[in-house]
Image (cartoon, helix red, strand yellow):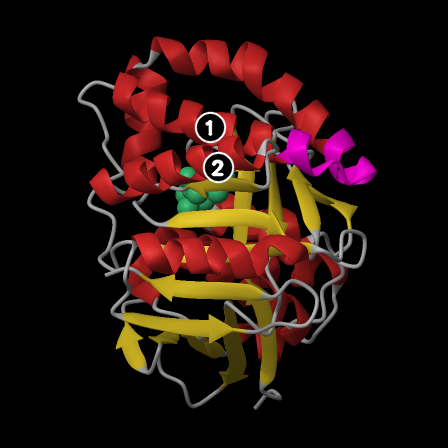
Amino acid sequence: MSDIITAIAPVNIAMIKYWGKRDEKLILPLNDSVSATLDTNVMCAKTSVCARPDILENEIWLNGIQTSFSNQRLQNCLNSIKAIAREQQSVNEELLSWNVRICSVNNFPTAAGLASSAAGYACLVTALARLYKVKTDVSKIARVGSGSACRSVYGGFVRWHAGVQADGSDSIATQIADSSHWKEMRVIILVVADTKKHISSVKGMSCAVKTSELLKYRVQVCAPTRVKQICEAIKDKDFSTFAEITMKDSNQFHAVCLDSYPPCVYMTDVSHKIVEVIHKYNEICGAVKVAYTFDAGPNACLYLLEKDVPEVLSLIKHIFPTTSDDFIKGLDAPTTHIDLV
Ligand code: PMV
């Protein structure tokens, strides 16, 4: 029986979105994307794995409930790690022949559509790589679980390179700067709805690739320019450029969703109200102090600097009287999570 190996991986939120694959099987994106990884003490997944001769079939438990292991992406991650272990002869064949038990928990609502699969797969492959003692770039393997998971393998600001190779060998994540680089950066998550997204990212992306004209322009022109500009803004700690690019890219991503046929609508009236409030606030301040970004769901992620947190929090609470608010404090990237449901 193996040791029990436990890993943790946080959620990441993209400023330059990944939307559209050039290879569905290998999960190779059409464009580079850039994200920030939240604090490990805040929103993260924790996964424990072990291999034993008495486990009759591979098992996976998510938040205490046993779930089917039939998911192809899950199997791909396990098989990829085992294949590398065989190649590297990092463990004996007996350990590789035993079934695994995987137990994963999230310290935030899984159904809230808050990038739980990214944290989950990043965590899973990190734990499996330790179990089988493999030495490899785990971001490449996390990618075949859920594309954006490759970015959760690193902390701080991360870029996922689309790569050019057909086998995906250069489609990896790299760190732009670690979390100590921009200490003043803060994130506020506004939970508009805690239900599961009605159109999965797999479906939404595939529809956009097939039908959206705007996606072609985004991939060729906007995304490469924005990736370059935001990497520079991060290095220079230039918040207003960072914020403007983040908001423009979120808006273009949702425009691509609407340009898909049939359209994918992820934002709600409350999401649009948040956009309006942030623009109004920035206008009154005479400076871009807050940026919003929305993934494939109605929940907002706000990026702002620490000095502006109290004012923005009181503004949000005033405009959206909340039924509950839950402050989650972290060390290097404190995140506040407000429930607007
Ligand atoms: O990795 P997936 O399949 O969950 O897709 C993530 C897509 C977005 O969250 C909308 C954008 C991104 O880059 O994270």
Magenta residue check for 326: no
- Taking depth in this image into account, of 179 and 211 the one nearest to the observer is 179
Residue bearing the label numbered 1: 23
On the image, the x and y values in percent for residue 203 come to: 27, 35
Residue 226 drawn above or below residue 333:
above
Find the magenta span and give its range.
232-242
Which quarter of the frame holds ligand 1?
A: top left
On the image, the x and y values in percent for residue 304 come to: 59, 49
Cβ–Cβ under 8 Å for marks 1 and 2: yes
Whole-angstrom CA distance, mark 1 to mark 2, is 6 Å
Prevalent SS, magenta region: helix
Query: Looking at the image, which residue is at 44% across and 60% down?
Result: 314
Give, as a three-letter code, the residue at label 1.
Asp
- Taking depth in this image into account, of 79 and 3 the one nearest to the observer is 3
The answer to which quarter of the image holds residue 268 is top left
Q: Is mark 2 within 8 Å of ligand 1?
A: yes
The answer to which quarter of the image holds residue 164 is top right
Residue 232 drawn above or below residue 176:
above
Q: Which mark is residue 27?
A: 2
Query: Looking at the image, which residue is at 82% across and 36% down?
Result: 236
The answer to which quarter of the image holds residue 233 is top right
**Helix, strand, or loop for circle 2?**
loop
